[in-house]
Amino acid sequence: MTNETNTATVPARTAGRLITIAAGTAGALLLWAVNDPWAGIDLAVRQGSGVQHIGPVAVAVTALLAGLAAWGLLTILERTTRQPVRIYRIVTVIVLLISLAGPLGSGIGLSTKLVLLGMHVTVGAALIIGLPGRRNCR
């Protein structure tokens, strides 16, 4: 009976993690949609000597890649450490804090910087809080 329970939790955990990554991505896209096309804030960053507009594809791909990388890290930690969730959260909070330097340094204008910071925090919070899921809920 134990094998059946473990077998049943793997698809549920996978589905939960996919939903978490999708939710973080959707949150970032919602922020983009509210601020870029609706509010008219031109989300642009300095890149080298030029300027690059941040579009929905860039937002979605970046959020999905961050989610998949976080999932990979969590999977490795679950297989190799005694406290995977604690280590995962420490590492991901540090990565999130470092990632905030990007919008602060390259965002053009205060509004753009704030929106990009919001996107980073939205995706980061979803992955930090939601990806490990609930354990031992008894």
Image (cartoon, rainbow, N blue to C red):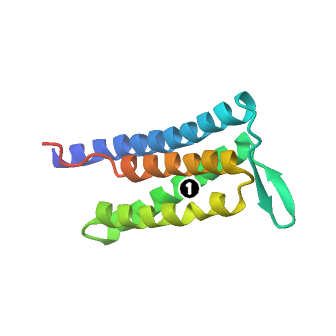
Q: Residue furthest top?
A: 38
Q: Is residue 2 above or below residue 38?
A: below
Q: Residue furthest left?
A: 138
Q: Residues within 10 Å of mark 1 (few under 14, many from 20)?
A: some
Left or right, 22 with respect to 37, comes to left
Identify the residue shown where x is 37% and y is 42%: 11
Identify the residue shown where x is 57% and y is 62%: 99
Total tally of numbered discs in the picture: 1
Identify the residue shown where x is 58% and y is 46%: 119
Q: Residue furthest bottom?
A: 80
Q: Quadrant of the N terminus?
A: top left
Secondary structure found at label 1: helix
Left or right, 28 with respect to 44, comes to left
Q: Residue furthest front?
A: 110
Q: Quadrant of the C terminus?
A: top left
Identify the residue shown where x is 40% and y is 66%: 76
Left or right, 1 with respect to 36, comes to left
- Using the rendered view, name the quadrant where residue 101 is placed: bottom right
* Location of residue 4 in the rendering, given as x and y in whole percent from the top left corner: 23, 43
What residue did someone put label 1 on? 66
Q: Is residue 81 above or below residue 61?
A: below
- Using the rendered view, name the quadrant where residue 14 is placed: top left
- Using the rendered view, name the quadrant where residue 28 is placed: top right
* Location of residue 91 in the rendering, given as x and y in whole percent from the top left corner: 41, 67
* Location of residue 98 in the rendering, given as x and y in whole percent from the top left corner: 53, 66
Looking at the rendered structure, the kind of residue marked 1 is Ala
